[in-house]
Image (cartoon, rainbow, N blue to C red):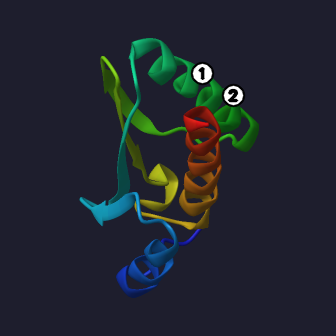
Amino acid sequence: MTPLSEDLIEKKLLHFPDWEYYDNALWAEFEFDNFKDCFSAMSRIAFECEAQNHHPSWSNVYNVLTISLSTHDANGVTEKDFKLAEAIEAIVELQEE
């Protein structure tokens, strides 16, 4: 898989307002009402990651989830990262309802 150019990444990010590109990765931070809601979203995201066989670097502190997406084999951001970002967005939106 080939890494995307910075110009293409920036263009694609126009459709992902919660995400930023820096340090050769896509980054997002999501805040939930409490730890339980955050962990619930993380669990759902984990199942999606397994289904896509693509795994983020992530951490959480109480109700905040920080996610970094990069395709390690390609040493950069690829379409796989945007596909997973899209799925994460859908999970987080569902969690907020």
| Element carrying mark 2 | helix
Kind of residue indicated by mark 1: Ser
94 in relation to 78, above or below: above
Locate residue 29, reporting x and y percent: 34, 43
51 in relation to 85, above or below: above
Please indicate whether residue 24 sits to the left or right of residue 91 in the image: left
Residue 58 or 73: which is nearer the viewer?
A: 58
Locate residue 3, reporting x and y percent: 48, 71
Locate residue 52, reporting x and y percent: 71, 44
Mark 2 closeness class: few <14, some 14–19, many ≥20 residues within 10 Å: few
Q: Which dot marks residue 1?
A: none
Kind of residue indicated by mark 2: Phe
Image point 54% across, 38% down: which residue?
A: 55
Quadrant in which residue 53 is drawn: top right
Residue 22 or 36: which is nearer the viewer?
A: 36
Q: Which dot marks residue 47?
A: 2
44 in relation to 1, above or below: above
Where does label 1 land, which residue?
43
Quadrant in which residue 54 is drawn: top right
Image point 44% across, 72% down: which residue?
A: 13
Q: Residue furthest left?
A: 23
Quadrant in which residue 66 is drawn: top left
Label 2 near label 1: C-beta < 8 Å?
A: yes
Image point 35% across, 52% down: which residue?
A: 27
